Amino acid sequence: MGTFMYRLSTRCGNSLLNSSILSRASLQTYARQQLMKRNEFAYLGCVFINTTCASQKKRKTAEEKKAPRIIQFTPKAKLAPTIEIWKNMSVADLAEALGKDTDHVFEVMRYVDNSIDYTRPSSIIDNWQVMKDVVTKSGFRYNIIAPPGKKEENVKDKDVKKRPPPDPSVLKPRPPVVTIMGHVDHGKTTLLDALRHTAVVASEFGGITQHIGAFSVKLNSGKKNETITFLDTPGHAAFKAMRARGAEATDIVVLVVAADDGVMEQTVESIRMAKEANVPIVVAINKIDKSDADVERTKKALLSAGIQVEDFGGDVQVVEVSALKGTNLDLLVEVISLQAQLLELKADPTGLVEGVVIESSTNVHRGKLATIIVQRGTLKKGAVLVAGTAWAKVRGMFDDKGQPLLSGSPSTPVEIIGWRDLPSAGDEVLEVDNEKQAHEVVKFREMLKMKQKQEAAQVIIDAKTQEYLKEYKAQLEKKWLMGRRKVRREGPRPKEIEEDNSPHVSIILKGDVDGSVEAILDVLETYNFNDDCQLSVIHYGVGQVTENDIELAETFGAIIYCFNVDINKNVQQTLETKDVKVKHHNVIYKLVDDLKEEISSHLPEKEVEEILGEANVLQQFEVNEGRHKVPVAGCRCTKGVLKKSAFFRLVRGEETLFEGTLKSMRHLKSDVDSIRKGVECGLQLEDKTVCFQPGDILICYEMKSIPQKTSWDPGF
């Protein structure tokens, strides 16, 4: 600036710059002419001229200086609106996103490079730069997203469903699927054992079926050999869900009722599930050989439960059997065969396989296994199956005796090897063309499952958000009434993670089959006493205990419950170095009883009152203590023993006047520690203001701590 002023003063002379009569226009014109010759001084010259001209402005008066200043802020520039674009949009799609017509897009494309090929509304804009330039020149910003709707449509088409009903011309007769249901210990497994001449009961722990068993049995009905598939479902209350699956996968239900016990709780439940599944029922009254058996009483009880037996004008056939001695088993088979003939059971043995998972398990040597009932088509080795979110390529098929099978026709129980993941009992089994399709179907179902989980979580999140907003608005309104604009925190900051010192029990559950694990989890769902002791299932699964299970149990301080599974040597060695408790069980109700004891051991002891004795007040006496007179109760012990160290309660009618300790206990003139029944004594309370009346009762009691027991009742 100094250099410019010097050069300008040299050219114009100091008199020109200092002249006060030089007009602003003349000075600006002269400066422009001079500075156009010297471009490097253009910017500085303008600054100098504006400064010089500004100095010539009229100075403010004192009143103007005192006047309030009005500050004007430049308004903020509004951001351009944002639209969403995606790959391979058409011209029409882009126009719709912009909120314009296609003519607008074509007009903008005249000023965009490489856009000459897009001449129709249906033309696909495959050049990202063209699309971005059109959006920018239209006065918008852009946000790139995935193509809407396209991804969902592609995934939806990848799911697999059951085939339409078959043409009646291709249907062929199939064996019936018979389910044996009833109450626990009514002889269901013994009956099945007698029908197939094997020893099933010997392999069951506690005489209770621990999971569903599917067996194909050849029966001699007198005219021809028939094949019937039996499902032995548990009668225990813990297996409610498993029995329901048995009713859904069956054609005929054989309801076993013991003649000595009659209709029980699980019997009624089995009847209800069979009726809901619209399945015909055949009643087998078992244990007729017992001395206390009463068949007529059992039939009347069935009538009360909604079973119209033939003897009372109904249509339900009743067969009196003895599974242990084999009495009338042939008659039961004839009734089942006749019922199957009336149903005219047929199935389509061609095409893709359809079925249902009866049970699934893991084996150390054979891997993941699943037993299914084929309902349509013929299963062969190499088939690709999908069940829920699991799929398999059939590497081997076996019957209930472990013998290899070449094919599985409708109504045949088949154990399959080759599952990548373990399916759940009750899952629908469908055959697909190849492994690629199986992957796509499983991926879609997993995504759908995750979406449902997210939607359920979102409902909870929204409810919590509304609750917090309601609380926040209430606090904000309160602050506004106090003259504050912002909600300020009052008091110390609360801890983000509060310490939880309440009792809790954590468990890890490992079982032999999926159905048993699910049944145990259903029992654990009935636990509703988390306020007393929190029960947490850290992990559950099918198969043997692994090292990961041990590490997880050590981290959370959990107990590992093994249901009918063992621990291999390597894991056992790892277990010996860890402080982890492992418990083995083979019967579900014993596992639950053990868990109840574990929960009870974590509950704090509770104080209970133990009555030691009682005394009747005969008369009040007053004794001198210094200058004061203190009331003393003259009593006679009527029950038990009175102890000086115990607590006393003074009761008058139905009102309690005092609860506390004694100051003194005397017999005659001697201080004593206890008074027996029938002995008179004088009792002085710690509270000297309490007065006695003849007829009052003094109750002597002690407080003792006893262990608590959980009130959890799982129903068996």
Image (cartoon, rainbow, N blue to C red):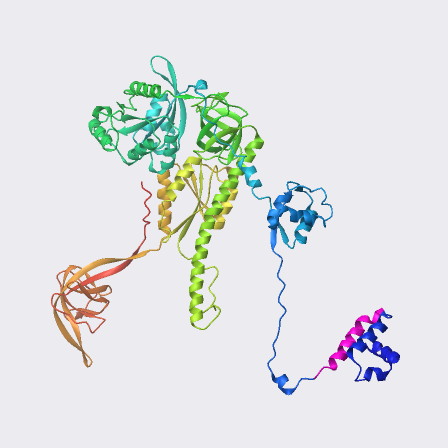
Q: Residue furthest top?
A: 223
Q: Is residue 52 magenta?
A: yes
Residue lying at 38% horizontally and 36% vertically, measured from the top left: 241
Report the span colored magenta: 39-58
Q: Quadrant of residue 80?
A: bottom right
Q: Is residue 645 above or below residue 438?
A: below
Numbered-mark total: 0
Q: Residue furthest right?
A: 11
Q: Give the x, y percent position of residue 676.
A: 16, 61
Compared across the picture, whether 251 is left or right of 390 comes to left
Q: Is residue 524 above or below residue 422?
A: below
Q: Is residue 476 magenta?
A: no
Q: Give the x, y percent position of residue 231.
A: 38, 27
Main secondary structure along the magenta-highlighted residues: helix
Q: Is residue 577 visible?
A: no
Q: Nearer the viewer, residue 580 or 217?
A: 217
Q: Give the x, y percent position of residue 197.
A: 36, 21
Q: Is residue 327 above or below residue 525?
A: above
Residue lying at 52% horizontally and 41% vertically, measured from the top left: 447
Quadrant that contains the N terminus: bottom right
Q: Is residue 596 visible?
A: yes
Residue lying at 55% horizontally and 38% vertically, measured from the top left: 153
Q: Give the x, y percent position of residue 368.
A: 50, 32
Compared across the picture, whether 304 is left or right of 563 comes to left
Quadrant that contains the C terminus: top left
Q: Nearer the viewer, residue 318 or 537?
A: 318
